[in-house]
Image: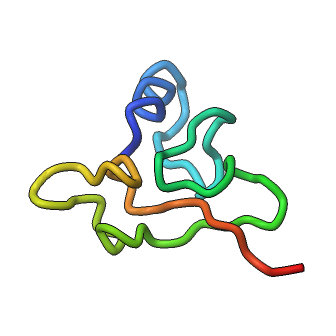
Amino acid sequence: MQRPQERARLASSSGSGHEAPGDEAPGDEAPGDDAPANAPATGENLCPDCRGTGVLDGKPCATCEGTGRVTQGIGGG
């Protein structure tokens, strides 16, 4: 499932509708994201609440907004 912002953006574009992970526009963060997409030292991971399904209790997961993915910090320092 796509975030509402992604659906609106895809509906207005002439693309294939299939975007690579990390192609989200700035400001397109889900509540469970630790950082904006494409931020340094971050990467996509499965949502810890819905375990990557995008669904929790029969509804779109609020943490990942139904995508099943969240952006998290990686590495250390």
Q: Is residue 57 left or right of residue 64?
A: left
Say how many tags the image has.
Answer: 0
Where residue 46 appears, as percent x and y from the top left, is: 45, 72
The furthest residue to the top:
12
- Residue displayed at 75% across by 53% down: 38
Name the residue at the left extreme. Answer: 58
Q: Is residue 20 left or right of residue 77?
A: left
The structure residue drawn at horizontal position 15% and vertical position 50%, both measured from the top left corner, is 59
Residue sticking out furthest to the front: 77
Q: How is the image coloured?
A: rainbow
The quadrant where residue 50 appears? bottom left
Residue 15 to residue 29: above or below: above
Quadrant for the C terminus, please.
Answer: bottom right
Q: Position of residue 30 (x, y in %)?
A: 49, 46
Tell me where residue 54 appears, x and y as whole percent.
30, 59
Of the pair 22 and 49, the residue shown nearer to us: 49
> Where is residue 76 drawn, in percent x and y?
83, 80
Left or right relative to 26: residue 64: left
The structure residue drawn at horizontal position 59% and vertical position 66%, both measured from the top left corner, is 44
The residue depicted at 67 percent of the width and 53 percent of the height is 35
Q: Is residue 5 above or below residue 37?
A: above
Looking at the image, which residue sits at the far bottom? 76
